[in-house]
Amino acid sequence: MTLLEKIETKQARLGVIGLGYVGLPLAVEFARAGFHVTGIDTNREKIDLLRSGRSYVRDVPDEQVGAVVEQGHLEATTDFTALAELDTVNICVPTPLRKTRDPDISFIHAAVQEIRKHLHAGQLVILESTTYPGTTDEVILPILSDGDFRVGKDFFLAFSPERVDPGNEQFQTRNIPKVVGGVTPACTRHALALYRSSVDHVVPVSSTRVAEMVKLLENTFRSVNIGLVNELACMSHTLGINVWEVIDAAATKPFGFMPFYPGPGLGGHCIPIDPFYLSWKARQFGFEARFIELAGQVNGFMPHFVTDRIADVLNEQEKSVRGSKILILGISYKADIDDIRESPALDIITLLARKGAILSAADPNVERFDVPGVDCPLVEPTPKALRDADCVVIVTAHTTFDYRTVVKESRAIVDTRNALKGITAANIHLL
Ligand code: SAJ
């Protein structure tokens, strides 16, 4: 039976390497489509949770994991030798930046080396991790082709960018169009066949480089537009104009405009990072990606801008940052999630700690967090905690916060997300 036939009859044995916020939803979606899926991750704790039918990704309910594990459609292991039995492998591992802001594709490398060890005829390998254009062709293909296997004949290789939007209840793996680019047309055909089983809409493109670039355009688009409104926020503050009102009014334009909103900075493991994969690659060819670098500078400045606004608000009370009690409301990188990676709240906490503030934080979605060398306990945002604070800073606006109490009890509020939209009060200071 050919791989295409195995996929079409759902007898193909699928694998997903990397069971994070991308890999786990994908593995579960494949399993719910009726495939036998082997999830592989180096994190023993994740594997144990999955084996006990529990999820650790907010967008994937325990019930979904429990059902596919119970049916035997999803197996989880740390053992890469399982690859020898698999017909397809999706790589969904992290692609962070090094301290030097260069791409770190060591996780991709490690996964591909494991795949190489167990590569057999007819296997389909798909990279989903966001990376620079050329990674699939220049890094993965040579490793998998170093024996007798020929791509497009003995094995198939493609790139398909992940588009998971953590916390988005409207768009999940099944109904987010999937872009797919193969090394050869046969590679594309096989990858499309696999995704058609579990995703409503697949979008073939002519190469892996195009597919890699699609993702980077999507995220650079966001980073640059967020940078634009962040600069506009700083400008509007200087001009004494309410930038939020400006954006809301501009958003009434029924065409040619898409609202983005200023904030305390850019968080998450994608938008602050992915564009620098593109600028790094462009620089190898002597091309300076100026918009990417500029957006990075503007977005990276926002925690400093917020800290200055806090100092201004305290100054109006004839207080210094040093010795003032500052309560940070919301520390995840965006609303209604528990992820604090790259969260601007951590930068703001660090900057305020350096100035000698007495810090505490409140976030109903975050159970623990740590800013090295900084004392910032997690507290309940009780009326007393709000009253005791010299300044309350809304850094992330969870929809579950009761802002009425915040406005009523707080002496001064710096609202970096316009969370108190429509409430006018002397103690509220907008970004
Ligand atoms: N942000 C703003 N202003 C905005 C929008 C976002 O300051 O107008 C901030 C957010 O607060 C957050 C950061 O930017 O700190 C990133 O926000 P995001 O909405 O881009 O959310 P992510 O990074 O969790 O998910 C994004 C996806 N989001 C959307 O498309 C809405 C998408 O770009 C990718 O699918 C995903 O990253 C990824 O995995 O690349």
Image (cartoon, helix red, strand yellow):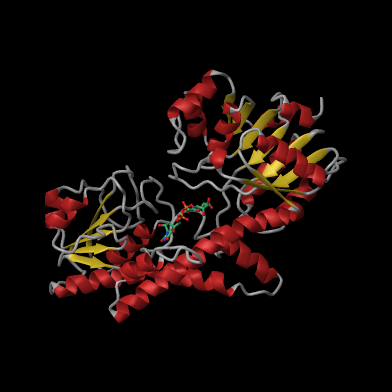
Numbered-mark total: 0
In the picture, residue 17 is in which quadrant?
top right
Whether 162 is drawn above or below 132: the answer is above
Q: Residue at x 34, y 58 (%)?
A: 345
Q: Residue at x 57, y 64 (%)?
A: 276
Q: Left or right? Give the position of 104 relative to 261.
A: right
Looking at the rendered image, the quarter that the N terminus falls into is top right
Camera-side residue of 242 and 43? 242
Q: Residue at x 60, y 31 (%)?
A: 30
Looking at the rendered image, the quarter that the C terminus falls into is bottom left
One can see residue 42 in this view: no
Q: Residue furthest front?
A: 254
Q: Residue furthest bottom?
A: 239
Q: Left or right? Give the position of 166 relative to 200.
A: left
- Expressed as whole percent of the image width and height from the top left, the position of residue 378 reads 26, 48
- Expressed as whole percent of the image width and height from the top left, the position of residue 123 reads 76, 35
Q: Left or right? Give the position of 31 relative to 398.
A: right
One can see residue 92 in this view: yes
In the picture, residue 198 is in which quadrant?
top right
- Expressed as whole percent of the image width and height from the top left, the position of residue 60 reads 47, 34
Q: Residue furthest right?
A: 148
Q: Left or right? Give the position of 296 relative to 187.
A: left
In the picture, residue 168 is in which quadrant?
top left
